[in-house]
């Protein structure tokens, strides 16, 4: 009996010690949860531009507008285009338009012309047709843009990897496309002095034809539009050629 009491006493002491140990021990700190906070970059506030007025357009020179386009393309290449308040620009532009330039671009969907030059609503006239070719409708649009609406610059914008240029090189025949491609053939003929392989698979050759197509378009503008030629000769406007690099987004102006 005495032996049993001793065991009971020992068990009680053990229980008490365990309880005291639990009370005195410092509880473990809960593990900190992983920080899931998403840090959002502050978006630039849209610029509150004003649509160009007649007075502002009149004060521009062709050289100023040309430099303006070059500067805008640098911002585009550097992914630093202007954040614009398009809604307000749309409303402001409803009262009239006084663009700085007329730009003839290829139909290609990969060339967002206003973005390429970092321009907003009401800044530029844009004409688009496959192969940036010249026809009577394009000439009439350019005459309207410059003679009637006061634009100071015409830019014919070709580009690398142009499907229309490649098709012209390949002598593609298909419906009305054939008629369009015939307007690029002079550039193909001009480029026959190219030393390498003269096929649409040769990027250097297609770029040569593409640039010559731009220069040929400028010659057609001057020969087919006495209005634009006279304005150009008087220095009222400039007619420039340019070439867009599909890989970099950079525009090179062709002298």
Image (tube, grey):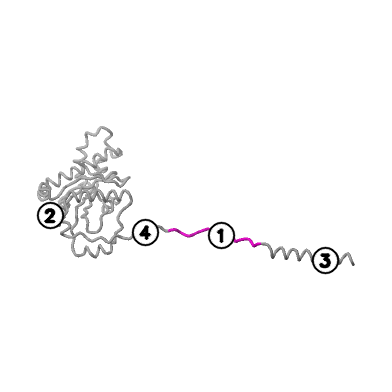
Q: Earlier in the sequence, mark 3 or mark 2?
A: 3
Which label was assigned to residue 43?
A: 4
Which label was assigned to residue 32?
A: 1
Tell whether 218 sits left or right of 201: left
Please report the bounds of the magenta region as a residue range: 26-39
Could you say which is closer to the camera, residue 150 or residue 110?
A: 150
CA distance for labels 2 and 1: 71 Å
CA distance for labels 4 and 1: 31 Å
Q: Are marks 4 and 1 in contact (CB under 8 Å)?
A: no
Q: Residue 156: percent from the left, percent from the top? A: 20, 47
Could you say which is closer to the camera, residue 94 or residue 104?
A: 94
Pointer 2 residue:
147
Q: Earlier in the sequence, mark 4 or mark 1?
A: 1
Of discs 3 and 4, which sits in the foreground? Answer: 3
Find numbered disc 3 in the image and state the secondary structure of the residue it sits on.
helix
Q: Residues within 10 Å of mark 2 (few under 14, many from 20)?
A: some
């Amino acid at each position: 009996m005495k032996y049993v009491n001793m065991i009971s006493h020992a068990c009680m002491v053990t229980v008490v010690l365990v309880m005291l140990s639990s009370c005195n021990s410092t509880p473990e700190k809960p593990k900190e949860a992983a920080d899931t906070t998403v840090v959002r970059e502050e978006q630039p506030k849209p610029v509150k531009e004003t649509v160009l007025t007649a007075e502002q357009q009149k004060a521009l020179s062709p050289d100023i507008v040309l430099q303006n386009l070059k500067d805008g393309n640098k911002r585009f290449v550097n992914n630093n285009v202007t954040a614009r308040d398009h809604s307000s620009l749309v409303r402001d532009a409803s009262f009239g338009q006084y663009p700085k330039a007329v730009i003839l671009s290829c139909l290609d969907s990969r060339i967002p012309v206003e973005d390429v030059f970092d321009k907003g609503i009401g800044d530029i006239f844009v004409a688009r047709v496959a192969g940036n070719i010249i026809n009577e409708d394009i000439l009439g649009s350019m005459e309207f843009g410059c003679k009637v609406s006061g634009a100071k610059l015409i830019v014919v914008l070709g580009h690398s990897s142009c499907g229309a240029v490649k098709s012209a090189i390949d002598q593609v025949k298909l419906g009305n496309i054939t008629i369009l491609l015939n307007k690029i053939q002079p550039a193909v003929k001009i480029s026959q002095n190219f030393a390498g392989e003269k096929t649409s698979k040769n990027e250097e050759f297609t770029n040569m034809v593409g640039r010559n197509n731009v220069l040929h378009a400028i010659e057609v503008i001057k020969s087919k539009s006495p209005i634009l030629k006279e304005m150009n000769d008087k220095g009222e406007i400039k007619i420039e050629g340019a070439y867009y690099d599909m890989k970099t987004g950079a525009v090179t102006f062709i002298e």
